[in-house]
């Protein structure tokens, strides 16, 4: 019997006086070898194995010796191999010249795993020897000292499983069960002297051992001596610039902890689901500057008037996010872009050119048109019959925008333009179906959006071409075509189409949402409604524009429920906010919703109190419903005029009251709008009824009843 080095110490005492435990072990192993030679009975159940006759083992075939004249096949050229194949050959080049063992055919998964482990240990040992020799130099190279293997602990004897369930151990697996070669002792990181042993080293002068740099392991608490399946990785360098900007000190921004399993993605999903609620939580927990997560360098939130001034006025450092957020294919499909998508010198040039068309004197020319369209809409309402206030206001403001901007009426011959604008608003640029599936395939929302954009641009291009051929009109398009820049040139067709599209899409939705919020808040405050009814008249346009109660109600609504609660910018260069370094390409979000609820500026910030505006004079960065800085809303004067005239037309004939049991929730995208439909009824002006309560999360944003409930932390 040929014995391996593992069992030599056992047979050294296997004489007559050997202990019985060693003899019993030898007998069990011999019995296992005999059973392994019976392949015919291995596949049968345990009850039938004893019935099979014992077959004599077949003589083994002689191992075929390699032919001396056998040559290796020519290897392909290195440049014809893939990079991974070349790397593998370079990594295993040291194995080509050493003799390969004979192939073992009877190997199962466990045997192959043991072979791999042994090969890894051998390569690791060779690398350590080479590294140690290189560190000490060729003249001071000395062999590793031999390490004595500790005596192997005897494991407790396990129960022998039943014969039918015992796994058959092949001969190759028993050979591989021998202990692996002992690993050399790892050198310590601190330099020390190691005394020479007698008979081991030629030179008995102690030499310092060079320190070995520690290695980074993933999931291995014990370092390199941890489990074999733990792989070694390199240290990850932090993203962003290697050092802070000159004069700044890098201070990690506070913020909530990332999700336990999903990490930052879960926080980003929570912010996208409810931007107002997530922003309010950051404001109350972390103060002026906070990140989407703790230490975030990709999205930071800034709160307060001073930070609003720092972000919104630095147009060259903080760019509008729409230029980078809109997909490139959609940006290329449009013929022109508006002011919301411009930055830098292009934005300043286009704004200077378009500003004269939006001055109060130019906007006042459209007052009669707005009042007439609002009166036509209100005349179609039936008192006491429920209708969707959100849908009616959206259709009215879109009709006003198309009529005042380029002189077409979508209620008549231009109904197709109205449908295209509605489809474009339904298919938002930032919808999940478009962001995560941006493919131009049949049936996809991405293709439908591209189709609507091309059709709307074609319709607007035909209107612009008609005007240039000789048509005239008292509308915004004619004013934009007449203005000239500093260089004496006006806007081309693509620029006109881009400006008109932006004004229609962004302008009319802002006005419609604010009108819905204002009428809902007045329905919950009868005293403020009576004050407005006394000041406005259905027929007097000038009185409606000059009415102080109506102006105060509109300002209070814009304070409590701003159209765009958050404003996002992209930092194109490193900056500093509140003592924190903001790296380049970090998104900075300012919150009008939180700024307008500062109790130091607006006492009782959650109450609807229009009379506060009789003496309140907040600064430009404490009250900014239309934004501030170079990217402030250019159509703010037109929006104020439009909303005042529509409110005068509605309140001049009716009181608006929600239906019993109505629920109003918020839906926040680019704008904050009521979610779903808003069912209301129109009542006569002299019908003074008690306020009907409204459910939903509108009560979280505004204190309508004075009850003690959760109001987003305020």
Image (tube, rainbow, N blue to C red):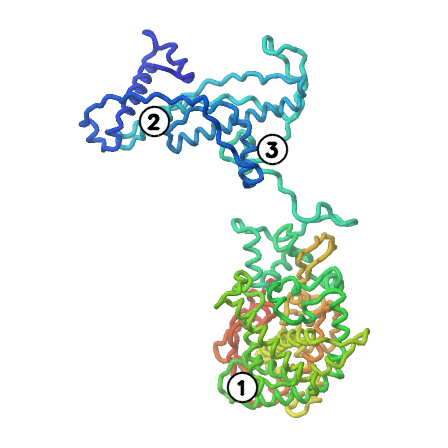
Figure quadrant of the N terminus: top left
Q: Are marks 1 and 2 in contact (CB under 8 Å)?
A: no
Ranked by sequence position, the earlier of labels 2 and 3 is 2
The residue under label 2 is: 170
Distance, label 2 to label 3, CA atoms, is 39 Å
The residue under label 1 is: 682
What crowding class fits label 1: few (fewer than 14 Cα within 10 Å), some (14-19), or many (20 or more)?
Answer: many
Which residue is more in the foreground, 443 or 671?
Answer: 443
Distance, label 1 to label 3, CA atoms, is 75 Å
Figure quadrant of the C terminus: bottom right
What crowding class fits label 2: few (fewer than 14 Cα within 10 Å), some (14-19), or many (20 or more)?
Answer: some
Numbered disc 3: secondary structure: loop
Which residue is more in the foreground, 39 or 188?
Answer: 39
Nearer the observer, disc 2 or disc 3? 2
Residue that appears at 52% across and 61% down: 437
Q: Residue furthest front?
A: 69
Residue 505 in sight: yes
Which residue is more in the foreground, 479 or 627?
Answer: 479
Residue that appears at 59% across and 60% down: 278
Ranked by sequence position, the earlier of labels 1 and 2 is 2
Name the quadrant containing residue 606: bottom right
Numbered disc 1: secondary structure: strand
What crowding class fits label 3: few (fewer than 14 Cα within 10 Å), some (14-19), or many (20 or more)?
Answer: few
Distance, label 1 to label 2, CA atoms, is 90 Å
Q: Are marks 1 and 3 in contact (CB under 8 Å)?
A: no
Residue 160, given in percent of the width and then of the height, sits at 30, 27
């Amino acid at each position: 019997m040929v014995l391996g080095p593992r069992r030599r110490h056992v047979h050294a005492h296997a004489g007559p006086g050997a202990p019985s435990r060693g003899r019993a072990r030898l007998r069990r192993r011999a019995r296992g070898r005999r059973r392994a030679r019976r392949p015919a009975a291995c596949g049968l159940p345990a009850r039938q194995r004893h019935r099979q006759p014992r077959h004599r083992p077949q003589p083994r075939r002689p191992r075929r010796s390699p032919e001396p004249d056998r040559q290796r096949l020519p290897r392909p050229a290195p440049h014809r191999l893939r990079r991974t194949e070349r790397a593998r050959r370079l990594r295993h080049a040291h194995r080509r010249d050493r003799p390969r063992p004979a192939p073992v055919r009877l190997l199962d998964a466990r045997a192959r795993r043991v072979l791999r482990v042994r090969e890894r240990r051998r390569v690791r040992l060779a690398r350590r020897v080479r590294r140690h020799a290189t560190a000490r130099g060729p003249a001071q190279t000395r062999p590793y000292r031999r390490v004595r293997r500790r005596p192997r602990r005897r494991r407790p004897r396990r129960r022998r499983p039943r014969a039918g369930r015992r796994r058959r151990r092949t001969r190759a697996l028993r050979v591989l069960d021998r202990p692996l070669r002992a690993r050399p002792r790892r050198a310590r990181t601190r330099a020390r002297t190691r005394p020479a042993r007698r008979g081991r080293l030629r030179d008995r002068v102690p030499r310092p051992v060079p320190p070995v740099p520690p290695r980074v392991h993933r999931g291995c608490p014990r370092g390199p001596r941890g489990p074999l399946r733990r792989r070694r990785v390199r240290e990850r360098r932090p993203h962003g610039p290697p050092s802070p900007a000159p004069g700044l000190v890098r201070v990690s921004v506070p913020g909530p902890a990332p999700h336990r399993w999903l990490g930052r993605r879960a926080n980003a999903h929570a912010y996208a689901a409810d931007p107002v609620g997530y922003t309010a939580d950051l404001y109350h927990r972390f103060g002026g500057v906070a990140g989407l997560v703790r230490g975030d360098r990709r999205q930071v939130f800034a709160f307060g008037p001073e930070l609003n001034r720092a972000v919104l006025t630095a147009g060259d450092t903080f760019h509008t996010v729409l230029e980078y957020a809109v997909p490139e294919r959609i940006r290329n499909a449009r013929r022109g872009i508006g002011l919301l998508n411009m930055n830098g010198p292009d934005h300043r040039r286009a704004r200077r050119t378009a500003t004269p068309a939006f001055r109060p004197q130019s906007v006042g020319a459209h007052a009669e048109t707005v009042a007439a369209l609002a009166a036509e809409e209100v005349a179609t309402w039936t008192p006491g019959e429920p209708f969707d206030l959100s849908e009616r206001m959206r259709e009215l403001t879109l009709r006003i925008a198309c009529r005042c901007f380029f002189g077409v009426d979508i209620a008549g011959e231009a109904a197709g333009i109205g449908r295209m604008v509605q489809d474009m608003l339904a298919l938002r640029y930032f919808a999940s179906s478009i962001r995560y599936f941006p493919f131009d395939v049949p049936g996809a929302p991405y293709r439908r959006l591209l189709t609507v954009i091309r059709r709307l641009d074609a319709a607007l291009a035909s209107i612009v071409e008609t005007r240039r051929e000789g048509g005239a009109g008292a509308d915004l398009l004619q004013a934009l075509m007449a203005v000239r820049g500093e260089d004496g040139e006006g806007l081309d067709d693509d620029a006109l189409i881009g400006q008109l599209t932006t004004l229609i899409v962004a302008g009319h939705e802002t006005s419609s949402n604010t009108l819905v919020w204002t009428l809902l808040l007045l329905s919950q405050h009868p005293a403020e409604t009576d004050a407005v009814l006394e000041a406005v008249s259905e027929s007097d346009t000038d009185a409606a524009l000059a009415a102080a109660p109506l102006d105060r109600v509109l300002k209070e609504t814009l304070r409590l429920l701003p159209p765009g609660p958050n404003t996002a910018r992209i930092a194109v260069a490193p900056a500093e906010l509140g003592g924190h370094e903001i790296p380049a390409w970090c998104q900075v979000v300012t919150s009008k919703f939180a700024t307008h609820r500062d109790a130091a500026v607006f006492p009782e910030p959650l109450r609807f109190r229009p009379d506060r505006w009789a003496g309140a004079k907040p600064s430009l960065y404490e009250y900014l419903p239309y934004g501030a800085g170079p990217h402030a809303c250019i159509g703010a004067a037109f929006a104020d005029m439009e909303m005042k005239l529509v409110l005068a037309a509605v309140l001049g004939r009716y009181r608006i009251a929600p239906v019993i049991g109505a629920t109003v929730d918020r839906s926040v995208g680019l704008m904050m709008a009521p979610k779903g439909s808003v069912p209301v009824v129109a009542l006569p002006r002299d019908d003074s009824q008690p306020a009907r309560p409204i459910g939903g999360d509108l009560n979280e944003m505004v204190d309508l009843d004075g009850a003690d409930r959760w109001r987003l932390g305020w």
